[in-house]
Amino acid sequence: MGINTERDIEANLQIGPTDQGMVRLFVLADGIEIPMDFDPEEADEIAEEIRLAATAARKVKPKRK
């Protein structure tokens, strides 16, 4: 299992600030709730990683199945 392993699982992702000044990523999948809290600096780093991954993904030519 890894980043390239596809799964047929639906999940809901919510992102927002908490009342404690943290940024929360909240994942709900198959009845499992996963709250992940990050300080704003960590959230900025994660956002940058997502932007870089999106840029890299645009350069990949999808393999035909």
Image: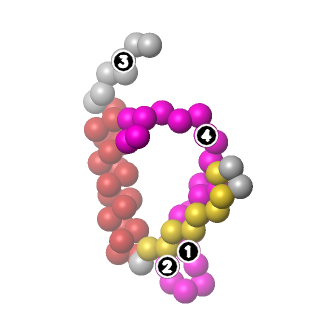
| Cα separation between marks 3 and 1 | 38 Å
In the rendered image, residue 15 lying in the magenta stretch gets the answer yes
Q: Secondary structure at mark 3?
A: loop
Is residue 49 shown left or right of residue 16? left
The mark that comes first in sequence, 1 or 4, is 4
Instruction: Please tell me how crowded label 2 is: few (under 14), some (14-19), or many (20+) other residues with Cα within 10 Å.
Output: some
Residue at (49% x, 73% y) in the render: 37
Q: Is residue 43 visible?
A: yes
What residue occupies the far top of the structure in this picture? 64
- What residue does disc 2 label? 22
- What residue does disc 3 label? 63
The mark that comes first in sequence, 2 or 3, is 2
Q: Quadrant of the C terminus?
A: top left
* x and y, in percent, of residue 55 in the image: 31, 40
| Dot 4 amino acid type | Ile
Numbered label attached to residue 39: none
Span of residues in magenta = 1-28
Residue at (38% x, 35% y) in the render: 4
Numbered label attached to residue 9: 4
Q: Is residue 58 above or below residue 11?
A: above
In the rendered image, residue 17 lying in the magenta stretch gets the answer yes
| Cα separation between marks 2 and 1 | 6 Å
| Dot 1 amino acid type | Pro
- What residue does disc 1 label? 17
Q: Is residue 61 above or below residue 2?
A: above
Q: Quadrant of the N terminus?
A: top left
